[in-house]
């Protein structure tokens, strides 16, 4: 289960790196607008700084989860589990906030939170065995 949880944490990290790229590097492009919804040029300009900052939150969570997963796979259980669970747990918490606070974004919250949820469950079960 540790291997499965680590693989899921790495997949969640990859998804959050993609979200980082869309928010911090590609905001306002057709690709980002396809994911986050169409915005006028004025809306893109007004939200660019917020999206840039939010993207980095996603990147930092991805780094935590990925580093933790790599350390777990390398046999450094305590530190790896702490980092992987901090990263994926925070991803899951953020997805839960989005799910509860924005009915229009529920499907995005579910997509964003599924991999972290599965990673947390697998890691907790694997660590308990």
Image: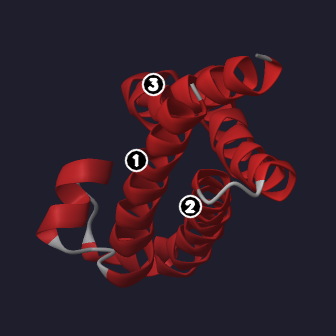
Which badge, 1 or 3, comes first in the chain's sequence?
1
Marks 1, 3: nearer the viewer: 1
| Contact (Cβ within 8 Å) of mark 3 with mark 2 | no
Query: Closer to the camera, 31 or 74?
Result: 74
Residue at x 81% of width, y 18% of height: 128
Marks 3, 2: nearer the viewer: 2
Query: Closer to the camera, 15 or 110?
Result: 15
* Mark 2 neighbour density, 10 Å: few (under 14) some (14–19) many (20 or more): many
Q: Check residue 70 in the rendering and tell me which mark sits there, or answer none.
A: none
Task: Tell me the CA gap for discs 3 and 2.
Answer: 20 Å
Q: Looking at the picture, how far across and down is residue 53, in whole percent?
A: 62, 76
Q: Looking at the picture, how far across and down is residue 3, in whole percent?
A: 51, 37
Outermost residue, front side: 75
**Pointer 3: what residue?**
110
Task: Judge whether residue 64 can be spotted in this image.
Answer: yes
**Pointer 1: what residue?**
11
Give left or right: position of 86 versus 102: right
**Pointer 2: what residue?**
66
Task: Tell me the CA gap for discs 1 and 2.
Answer: 9 Å
Task: Identify whether 13 is placed above or below 4.
Answer: below
Task: Tell me the CA gap for discs 1 and 3.
Answer: 15 Å
Residue at x 42% of width, y 66% of height: 17
Disc 1 element? helix
Disc 2 element? helix
Query: Closer to the camera, 100 or 17?
Result: 17
Q: Quadrant of residue 54?
A: bottom right
């Amino acid at each position: 289960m540790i291997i499965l949880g680590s693989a899921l944490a790495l997949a969640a990290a990859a998804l959050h790196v993609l979200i980082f790229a869309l928010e911090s590097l590609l905001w306002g492009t057709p690709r980002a607008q396809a994911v986050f919804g169409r915005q006028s040029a004025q809306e893109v300009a007004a939200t660019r700084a917020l999206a840039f900052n939010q993207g980095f939150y996603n990147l930092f969570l991805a780094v935590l989860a990925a580093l933790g997963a790599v350390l777990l796979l390398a046999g450094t259980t305590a530190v790896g589990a702490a980092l992987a669970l901090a990263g994926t747990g925070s991803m899951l918490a953020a997805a839960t906030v989005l799910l509860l606070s924005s009915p229009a974004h529920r499907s995005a919250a579910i997509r964003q939170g599924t991999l972290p949820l599965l990673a947390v469950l697998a890691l907790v079960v694997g660590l308990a065995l």
